[in-house]
Amino acid sequence: MIAAIAEEATQSLILEAKDVHKWYPNGFHALRGANLQVQRGEVVVIMGPSGSGKSTFIRTFNALEDYQKGTIQFDGLPLGNDLRHIEAIRREVGMVYQQFNLFPHLTVLQNLTLAPVLVRGRSRVQAQQRALELLARVGIAEQAGKFPGQLSGGQQQRVAIARSLCMDPRLMLFDEPTSALDPEMVREVLDVMQGLAADGMTMVVVTHEVRFARQVADRVVLMADGEVVEIAPPETFFTNPSHERTRRFLDQIL
């Protein structure tokens, strides 16, 4: 029975980072043995002070940042220097950045259909149908024919989310997706992310949005100085953290 439970836990694990270290060429030790496990359907929020390594850590999960020590596995596939593994993982991991990174010369619909046609090999008709479904899902179906520069920041970020979803990823990474938005636009993006979580999407989110973390996260992570300091359910993390470093951080943001 114990073996069956262990096997079930292994099968539900989609991402595992063990003892991950990263040094930049100037010698800066950005990640210092960071560890994280993410289960299917789980929402993990990573918080921490500026320069703590949050964005660097999340960007190692799809090889946007390399690392020099430790291991990262996505759904059992090791993420190292093998380009075949990197390409396979990137097809299954969507990412939404601080900046929207949309192609300004393409319409919203063209932005969404480009990768499914070129990478997934879908027909243009299939890709367009899926794109329109997802634009409706994020509440901006009427913007399909516009160019990114004609949209507000919140609308552009919702396009970026829909673009990632067009690849039908098994994991979504969000790197401070609301930090570049005006305050009145933050809520509309967080509402979309909350809807994705409710639909069962597996998500790792770097953010300072406390209300989102409290309401949506299954676990909240504190990073500081390149290390994972604490991992706990939101109620415990925000009201009864174990580590003094977490308490100091919360004193600054709450």
Image: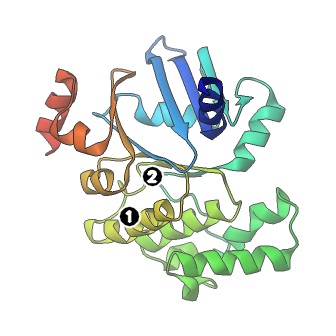
Q: Is mark 2 on a helix, strand or loop?
A: loop
Is disc 1 surrounded by few (<14), some (14 to 19) or many (20+) residues within 10 Å? some
The relative height of residue 159 versus residue 54 in the rendered view (above or below) is below
Query: Which residue is at 23% across, 38% downward?
Result: 236
Query: Which residue is at 32% across, 50% downward?
Result: 213
Question: Which amino acid, mark 2?
Answer: Gln
Query: Which residue is at 55% across, 57% downward?
Result: 201
* Disc 2 versus disc 1: nearer the observer: 1
Sequence-first tag of 2 and 1? 2
Which residue bears the numbered disc 2? 98
Residue 49, by quadrant, is: top left
- What numbered label is drawn on residue 190? 1
- Residue 70 drawn at (x, y percent): 59, 15
Query: Could you tell whether 66 is left or right of 185 in the image?
Result: right
Question: Which amino acid, mark 1?
Answer: Leu
Residue 59, by quadrant, is: top right
Q: Which residue lies furthest to the bottom in this view?
A: 142
Residue 148, by quadrant, is: bottom right
- Residue 131 drawn at (x, y percent): 68, 75
The relative height of residue 113 versus residue 226 in the rendered view (above or below) is below
- Residue 56 drawn at (x, y percent): 48, 31
The relative height of residue 187 versus residue 39 in the rendered view (above or below) is below
- Residue 238 drawn at (x, y percent): 20, 41
How many numbered marks have been drawn onto this rendered protein structure?
2
- What numbered label is drawn on residue 51? none
Q: What element carries label 1?
A: helix
The relative height of residue 148 versus residue 252 in the rendered view (above or below) is below
